[in-house]
Amino acid sequence: MDDSSLARTPVVVYGITLLGAALAYVVVPAAIIRAQGPDSTLKRVLGKDRKGRISLVLHFAGVACALLGEDHGGILIDVGVAFYVIVAVLWLIPDRRIEQDLNASAHGR
């Protein structure tokens, strides 16, 4: 993306790659929970998984903005990249749900 000065195609391709990873992050746990049943430990730990779903929506918005933007200096491409950055910052905050559940289980809570 940098070598192309944020041209539309590289930004869109990068976003689609990120969108694929975000989709997998939502689909794989859902499949595991479905296989384990309604009393799944993973379901209890993840809850509604807001962070994963927000990431999916923001990546989709980033791709859409980049697709609608113009090459080299289009403001919508910059907005699309900003969505990607927001997701990255969101995930810099550690997700401690599984760790907290394991600690609670180890202490008999």
Image (cartoon, grey):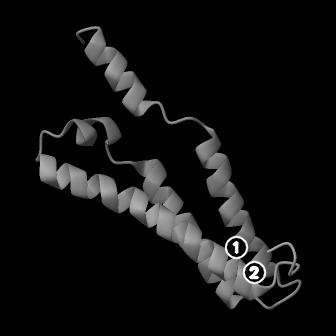
User: Most extreme residue toward the front, as rendered?
Assistant: 3
Name the image quarter holding residue 68.
Answer: bottom right
Q: Tell which of 108 and 21 is nearer to you.
A: 21
Q: Residue at x 64, y 41 (%)?
A: 92
- Does residue 24 appear to the left or right of 4 in the view shown? left
Q: Tell which of 63 and 28 is nearer to you.
A: 28
Q: Please provide percent x and percent y for residue 80.
A: 70, 73
Q: Residue at x 49, y 57 (%)?
A: 54
Q: Disc 2 on helix, strand or loop?
A: helix
Compared to 13, does 27 lie above or below?
A: above
- Does residue 57 appear to the left or right of 36 in the view shown? right
- Does residue 41 appear to the left or right of 55 in the view shown? left
Q: Tell which of 72 and 32 is nearer to you.
A: 32
Q: Which dot marks residue 76?
A: 2
Q: Residue at x 40, y 62 (%)?
A: 24
Q: Residues within 10 Å of mark 1 (few under 14, many from 20)?
A: many
Q: Please provide percent x and percent y for residue 16.
A: 57, 76
Count every numbered label the image shows and give the total.
2
Q: Are marks 2 and 1 in contact (CB under 8 Å)?
A: yes
Residue at the spot of label 1: 80
Name the image quarter holding residue 44.
Answer: top left
Amino acid residing under circle 2: Leu
Amino acid residing under circle 1: Gly
Q: Please provide percent x and percent y for residue 99.
A: 41, 26
Q: Please provide percent x and percent y for residue 34.
A: 16, 54
Q: Which dot marks residue 12?
A: none
Compared to 42, does 75 lie above or below?
A: below
Quarter of the C terminus within the rendering: top left
Q: Disc 1 on helix, strand or loop?
A: helix
